[in-house]
Amino acid sequence: MYALAPDISAVDTDYGIALLHQVRGEYWSLNPTGAIVLRSALESGDPGHAVDRLVAAFDVDGGEAAQDVAHLMDSLVTMGILVRRPA
């Protein structure tokens, strides 16, 4: 399972999700595909769920989508945007 880090705020936009680190003042923007991955991580914690949603929404290969999802989720954790929670 995943959660937003405590100092991160997220707001849906017309083009994805905007994220703000409230203490450091850093800001990021995720496009629609990144938003699907983040929402899936927060809803289910299962990267496979994000892959399924991407394959259903876009013309993308499942293997490629799985690699992209893994990379983005690792990046979000490394940047301190997402934190892993115990199940």
Image (cartoon, grey):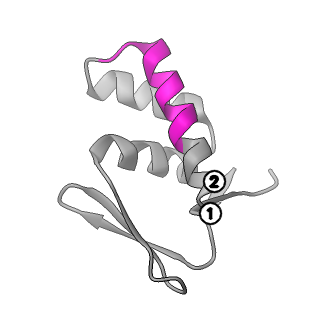
Looking at the image, which is closer to me, 64 or 2?
Answer: 64
The residue that disc 2 covers is 77
Q: Residue furthest bottom?
A: 23
> Tag 2's secondary structure?
helix
Answer whether residue 44 is visible to the viewer in this image: no
The residue that disc 1 covers is 80
**Vertical side of 64 occupied by 8: above or below:** below
Region in magenta: 60-72
Looking at the image, which is closer to me, 69 or 78?
Answer: 78
Q: Amino acid at mark 2?
A: Val
Q: Amino acid at mark 1?
A: Gly
Q: Are marks 1 and 2 in contact (CB under 8 Å)?
A: yes
**Vertical side of 50 occupied by 1: above or below:** below
Q: From the viewer's perspective, is 17 left or right of 75?
A: left
Answer whether residue 25 is visible to the viewer in this image: yes
Q: Is disc 2 surrounded by few (<14), some (14 to 19) or many (20+) residues within 10 Å?
A: some
- Where is residue 25 drawn, in percent x and y? 45, 82
In the image, is residue 15 part of the stretch drawn in magenta? Answer: no
